[in-house]
Image (tube, rainbow, N blue to C red):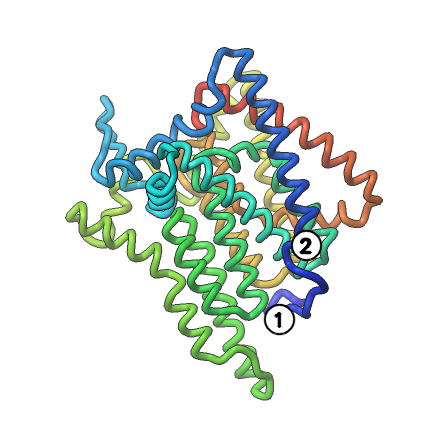
């Protein structure tokens, strides 16, 4: 497979769920370890793990949208305006739907959505990695995603799991030539988070690349042109529809959503604010160690992306991972959230997943098990801190 190909996958032996079962069971085990560790850690600090997962920070904003709709805002003493219009609607819509048909509260409905979406995301990551590198790499990719230091967010009433599920399955649909499915899932991803633009970009670039290939190799046939064109049309509808609605709702036109984000001091500045944040760490010691760690972390991300390119990952994965990473690092948002914003960039995990897949099963199990324990402890420590993830 080359970075410009988008082939239809060969038939797989056995049901798809059975092929993915080891990855999903491993993923569930890692998440269960994280929940047990969080419960024990929170009990020691006299905090509620349920509240940490469902009723703090962004999860509160989502449940307020589900319960009361849009229009709620908080005016801070410094003049900033935090409006719930900054939060895209798909997660609160699902919370409202589950709360309407079950006895669950909006917060608990959010946890249920997150739990189901995280399993769907794990399955989607497996499907993509299995398609590109085979089932062993697929299992390792899922487990690596589960044991990320910020993996605890996958179990929170946040939108990262839902977005990652939609993105992964949209990318898989592109890789397997299911263009209309890819466009629809990209549109839903655009209703989930602003970074839905990364999924749209992947669909568009893959479709355009396929048109270019057909012009250079006319004899080659693939999915009908109209399907690819329609996918390109459908993909941006979710994000565009919400952004335009916000502009009309606020009376500020098509750019109204940018004003809403500005009220949260969010924006795209090319990484200037993040660079200043890192630079300020070097004004004293031991904060300079944190600055050095941040530089190493960014370098690691760049290095992983370079490896993805050298390993000739399919073009849609490279585009998607590149845009997610760029938006996360170059946003002027709360810097403590950047690891969480990078959570959906799962194609960056494919190179280490492939390396683990080449090890003996016992050795890779020991590596992943050790990292899982460390991740569970860090996640519990992180959520019991003062700042939002």
Location of the N terminus (image quadrant): bottom right
Which element carries disc 1, helix, strand or loop?
loop
On the image, numbered disc 1 is attached to which residue?
7
Which label sits on residue 268? none
Q: Please, is residue 222 above or below residue 286 in the view? A: below
On the image, numbered disc 2 is attached to which residue?
18
The percent position of residue 158, horizontal first and vertical second, equals 43, 37
- Camera-side residue: 329 or 47? 47
Q: Are marks 2 and 1 in contact (CB under 8 Å)?
A: no
Q: Is residue 265 left or right of residue 323?
A: left
- Camera-side residue: 290 or 50? 50
Count residues near mark 2 (Cα–Cα under 10 Å), then give few for <14, some for 14-19, many for 20+: few
Q: Is residue 107 left or right of residue 352?
A: left
Q: Report the residue at 62% width, 71% height from top.
A: 7
Q: Nearer the viewer, mark 2 or mark 1?
A: 2
Q: Please, is residue 193 above or below residue 181 in the view? A: above
Q: Is residue 21 left or right of residue 315?
A: right
How far apart marks 2 and 1 lie (CA) works out to 23 Å
Q: Report the residue at 45% width, 41% height from top.
A: 113
Residue at the bottom extreme? 219
Q: Report the residue at 50% width, 43% height from top.
A: 161
The percent position of residue 109, horizontal first and vertical second, equals 41, 37
Asked whether residue 158 appears in the rendered view, the answer is yes
Q: Mark 2 or 1 closer to N-term?
A: 1
Q: Report the residue at 62% width, 56% height from top.
A: 127
Which element carries disc 2, helix, strand or loop?
helix
Res 270 quadrant in image: top left
- Camera-side residue: 225 or 210? 225
The percent position of residue 250, horizontal first and vertical second, equals 18, 45
The percent position of residue 307, horizontal first and vertical second, equals 67, 52
Asked whether residue 274 appears in the rendered view, the answer is no
Count of numbered circles on the image: 2
């Amino acid at each position: 497979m080359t970075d410009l190909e988008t082939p239809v996958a060969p038939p797989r032996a056995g049901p798809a769920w059975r092929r993915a079962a080891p990855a999903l069971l491993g993923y569930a085990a890692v998440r269960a370890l994280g929940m047990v560790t969080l419960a024990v850690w929170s009990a020691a600090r006299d905090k509620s793990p349920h509240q940490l997962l469902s009723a703090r920070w962004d999860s509160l904003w989502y449940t307020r949208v589900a319960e009361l709709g849009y229009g709620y805002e908080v005016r801070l003493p410094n003049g900033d305006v935090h409006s719930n219009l900054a939060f895209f609607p798909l997660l609160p819509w699902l919370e409202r739907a589950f709360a309407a048909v079950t006895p669950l509260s909006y917060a608990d409905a959010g946890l249920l959505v997150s739990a189901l979406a995280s399993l769907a995301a794990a399955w989607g990551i497996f499907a993509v990695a299995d398609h590109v590198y085979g089932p062993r790499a697929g299992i390792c990719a899922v487990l690596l995603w589960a044991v990320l230091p910020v993996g605890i967010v996958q179990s929170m009433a946040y939108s990262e799991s839902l977005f990652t599920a939609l993105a992964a399955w949209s990318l898989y649909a592109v890789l397997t030539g299911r263009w209309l499915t890819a466009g629809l899932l990209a549109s839903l991803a655009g209703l989930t988070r602003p970074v839905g633009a990364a999924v749209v970009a992947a669909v568009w670039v893959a479709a355009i690349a396929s048109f270019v290939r057909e012009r250079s190799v006319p004899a080659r046939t693939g999915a009908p042109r109209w399907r690819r064109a329609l996918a390109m049309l459908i993909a941006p509808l979710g994000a565009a529809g919400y952004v335009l609605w916000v502009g009309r709702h606020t009376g500020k036109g098509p750019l109204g959503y940018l004003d809403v984000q500005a009220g949260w001091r969010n924006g795209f500045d090319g990484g200037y604010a993040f660079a200043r944040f890192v630079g300020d760490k070097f004004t004293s010691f031991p904060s300079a160690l944190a600055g050095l760690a941040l530089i190493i972390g960014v370098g690691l991300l760049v290095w992983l992306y370079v490896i993805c390119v050298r390993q000739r990952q399919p073009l849609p994965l490279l585009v998607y991972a590149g845009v997610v990473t760029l938006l996360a690092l170059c946003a002027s948002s709360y810097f403590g959230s950047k690891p969480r914003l990078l959570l959906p960039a799962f194609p960056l995990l494919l190179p280490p997943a492939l390396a683990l897949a080449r090890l003996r099963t016992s050795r890779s199990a020991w590596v992943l098990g050790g990292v899982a324990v460390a991740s569970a402890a860090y996640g519990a420590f992180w959520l019991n801190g003062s700042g939002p993830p």
